[in-house]
Structures are given as structure tokens and as C-alpha cells.
Amino acid sequence: MGCEGGGVTGVAGLGSDWGRTGIVRMQLMNSAERYGVVAQTLHWVTLALFVAIFALAWIQDGLPLSPEKIRLINLHKSVGVTILVLAVLRLAWRWFSPPPGLPPGMADWERRLAHASHVALYVVLLAQPVIGILHSAAANFPVVVFGLFTLPALIGPSQEVKEVLENAHHLLARLILALVVIHVLAALRHHFIVKDSVLTRMLPLMGKGRGE
Ligand code: HEM
Ligand code: HEM
């Protein structure tokens, strides 16, 4: 995670900005200025899955025990496992293709805060699904991913452990919401107040961002 500062640019002849024809040319890899298509896709798909998993959590929470509730919980678990897989892929991709460095002119404290918030987001992206998976095992329920395969139970059934993990899952869900709100406000501040390229370089089809 400490590898910010730009990486391999372009791949297979793909550039990063608008061509003379006006057709946007995209790059797969991250460059010194922008996130590439792979990192952008993983980021925005994760956001979509986050919206879905919180919506599922709130709907399933309000239902009485029923086949419908169990169906939604199973879907919630599958989406959560997908978020975990995407988080691992994102970290691997980040290592393979380092993300752009932060724009010049940012104060030291701001850089440290940005870095710390990204680390925190990755930690919760990994921790929350792992806690969910362990919670299911402690509750003696299988995790069947989209009806395709069942994850092995990593711990045995235990009412005590189940309760601890359930509380942790609930608490972390609130922490995630708080982190994401701060993250979004920071992105909007960069775009509308500081007016730098931090938001546009994570957006697809934006070409070169401000100050690049
Ligand atoms: C990043 C991924 C995840 C997020 C953001 C998330 C979020 C949530 C939220 C907000 C709730 C409702 C909590 C409440 O009522 O206060 C919940 C409940 C639950 N989650 Fe997750 N979850 C994730 C991943 C998983 C995974 C991977 C599993 C299991 C494989 C899982 C299993 C459950 C279960 C069984 C419940 C119901 C617990 C209960 O009975 O209250 N979650 N989750
Ligand atoms: C509307 C919602 C969101 C917006 C506008 C947004 C915006 C951004 C922007 C602009 C960046 C690039 C920051 C930079 O260049 O330094 C970024 C990075 C990041 N975002 Fe978001 N984001 C959103 C939702 C989320 C969600 C839901 C998560 C996961 C919980 C998340 C996790 C991350 C992470 C981990 C990074 C660092 C990527 C890396 O460098 O590897 N974001 N986001």
C-alpha cells in the first residue's frame, strides 16, 4: 500500500487520453496520472456491490424468519464473498500496477490522511466478509456462494463466538458507512473546492484530468 507514485503506463498500444478522432483511448494499467480501466472497474463494481449488500442487509433485517429471508441472507453472503474476492484482486492489481501518486501541492498531513483512509477501507473490505464467513460457521450455517459451491467451515459451531462475531459484523458495518461517507466527502472536496484531478482520475472516459 505504500507504493503510490505511478507505475507502468499503457499496455498493448492502448493510450490514456482522447485520440484525434475524439474516440477515447483507455489504458488498462494505472499510470502516474490516472487509475487505469482495471482499477476503475474494480472500484466502481465494489461500490455497486456495497449498495446491494447494505440494501439486502436492511431488507433481510426487517423480515420475519421465512424462506424469503433465508434467500436474501444467502444472497447477502454471496455478494459479501464477491466483495472479498474483488478486494484481494484490487490489492494484487495495486501491487502489480501501482496507483497514481497524489497531486503535488497536497500538504503532508493530507497525504498521510488520504493514505490512512485507503488503508482503512482495504482493511474493512477484507475484515467484514471474513467476519461474516466465520459468523456463519459459528452459527452452523453453510456459506453457499450463488448456489454454486459451499465454502469450508473454518471454525466449529459456538453460540458464544457467534454472538461476538455478530456484534463485530454489526459494528464494522457502521464503521464502513462512516468511512465511506468521509471518503466520498473527501473526493467531492477535491473536485469542487481544491479543483484537482483526484476524482476525475478514478472516473472512466474522463481523459486527462485537471492539473495533469
Ligand atoms: C463487505 C461485506 C459485508 C458487509 C458490508 C455486510 C454488512 C452487513 C450488514 C449491514 C448487516 C446487518 C447488520 C445489522 O442488522 O446491524 C449484515 C448482516 C449479516 N451479514 Fe453481512 N456484510 C458483509 C459480508 C458478509 C458475508 C461475507 C457474510 C457471510 C458469508 C455475511 C453474513 C451476514 C449475516 C448472516 C447477517 C445477519 C446477521 C444477523 O442475524 O443479524 N455478511 N451484514
Ligand atoms: C460515490 C462513492 C465513491 C466515490 C465518489 C469514490 C471516489 C474515489 C476516488 C476519487 C478515489 C481515488 C483517490 C485517489 O486518487 O487518491 C478512490 C479510491 C479508493 N476508493 Fe473510493 N469512492 C467511492 C466509494 C468507495 C467505496 C464504497 C469503497 C469501498 C468500501 C471505496 C474504496 C476506495 C479505495 C480502497 C480506494 C483506493 C484505491 C487504491 O488506490 O488502490 N470507494 N475512491
Image (tube, helix red, strand yellow):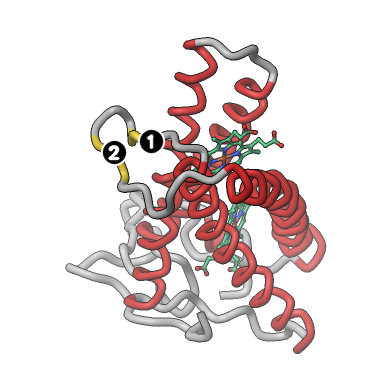
Residue found farthest to the bottom: 108
Q: Is mark 2 within 8 Å of ligand 1?
A: no
Residue at x 36%, y 53% (from the top left corner): 24
The residue indicated by pointer 1 is 142
Toward which corner of the image does residue 109 lie, by quadrant? Answer: bottom right
Residue at x 47%, y 75% (from the top left corner): 99
Residue at x 41%, y 72% (from the top left corner): 94
Q: Quadrant of ligand 2?
A: bottom right
The residue indicated by pointer 2 is 150
Residue type, numbered disc 2: Thr
Location of residue 13 in the rendering, given as x and y in whole percent from the top left corner: 20, 68
Secondary structure state at the residue bearing disc 2:
strand
Q: Which of 86/74 is in front?
A: 74
Secondary structure state at the residue bearing disc 1:
loop
Quarter occupied by the C terminus: bottom right
Location of residue 47 in the rendering, given as x and y in whole percent from the top left corner: 54, 45
Toward which corner of the image does residue 185 lie, by quadrant? Answer: bottom right
Toward which corner of the image does residue 40 lie, by quadrant? Answer: bottom left
